[in-house]
Image: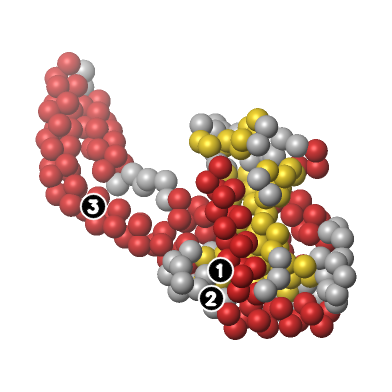
Amino acid sequence: MTTTPGRRSNAGASARRQGELQRAAERAAQHRRAKWALPLTAAAAAVTGWAAGTVTVWQVGALVAAAVLAYGVRQTYRRQHNSWTSGADGEEATARLLAPLARRGYAVLHDRAIPGSKANLDHLVVGVFGVALVDSKNWQSRKSRIVITGQLLRYGRYDQTKALQTAVWEAQQAARVLGVPVRPILAVHGAKVPAPRGRTELHGVTVVEAKKLRGMLAGLTPQPGWDAARVTAVEQLAEQRLPRHSG
């Protein structure tokens, strides 16, 4: 069985690579901007520092100039939110949560490519309950929360219907490849799911707080014909037909 949590399990690897590419592009843009922005900042710092020094003392002018220069540098090299890196962090956290299941006879695979697509499967869990596709969501904003109205899921201002549809589609692709039904699950890190036991069903997808994911999977009803031998057979099939994602 696949037992190693975090980065060593390959969880989040493809998202991490995309995050690194995005960060490299951001740094290149910052360096280009710095070529003209920093000289202007230095000039502004000199002028404001001189003005402050003439009406007070030179030490105050020096402090003002240093503050203006520091602010300009900080603004020039300020990092933007990197959704790829955040996503990779969420996938790694989910892998750590799922690791104990692998030691209890479940098969757990991470970051698998979907044949014929650039998309990936965050996590696959195979057990006596059958097969589950787990899509990790790292929703950590302090200003946003999950709101559920009927079958509508929102996180902050954003409608998450597409996230649910994506989970369904990914589960369908895994089912097509493996030849067995696959249950779609959205595991949410950070934000609370406003439902009993921290989980709900929306559009055929189980939305659950990540910290409750392992217990939920362990508590699923065993299905007829799903024993240790079949779990191993499906795991081996997944290893063959769903290779690790290289994107």
Q: Is residue 27 visible?
A: yes
Q: Can residue 101 be seen in this view?
A: no
* Residue under label 3: 29
Q: Which picture quadrant has residue 70?
A: top left
Q: Where is residue 24 in the image (x, y as percent from the top left)?
A: 31, 60
Residue 28's disc is: none
Q: What secondary structure is found at the residue carrying circle 1?
A: strand
Instruction: Mark 3 or mark 1: name the one nearer the start of the chain.
Output: 3
Q: Position of residue 224 (x, y in %)?
A: 87, 70
Query: Is 32 located above or below residue 52 in the figure?
Result: below
Q: Which residue is drawn at 29% across and 39% down?
A: 75
Residue 111's disc is: 1
Gap in Å between the C-alphas at discs 3 and 1? 30 Å
User: Which quadrant, please, contains the C terminus?
Assistant: bottom left
User: Which quadrant, please, contains the N terminus?
Assistant: bottom right
Q: Which residue is drawn at 21% across and 18% down?
A: 56
Q: Which picture quadrant has residue 200?
A: top right
Query: Is 204 located above or below residue 244 in the figure?
Result: above
Q: Where is residue 91 in the image (x, y as percent from the top left)?
A: 58, 60
Q: Residue at x 52, y 55 (%)?
A: 87
Q: Which picture quadrant has residue 7?
A: bottom right
Q: Which amino acid does label 1 sit on?
A: Asp
Left or right placement of residue 35 versus residue 152 in this view: left
> Mark 2 near mark 1, Cβ–Cβ under 8 Å?
yes
Instruction: Mark 2 or mark 3: name the one nearer the start of the chain.
Output: 3
Q: Which amino acid does label 3 sit on?
A: Ala
Mark 3 or mark 1, whichever is nearer to me: 1
Gap in Å between the C-alphas at discs 2 and 3? 32 Å
* Residue under label 2: 244
Query: Is 205 located above or below residue 60 in the figure?
Result: below
The residue most toward the top is 55
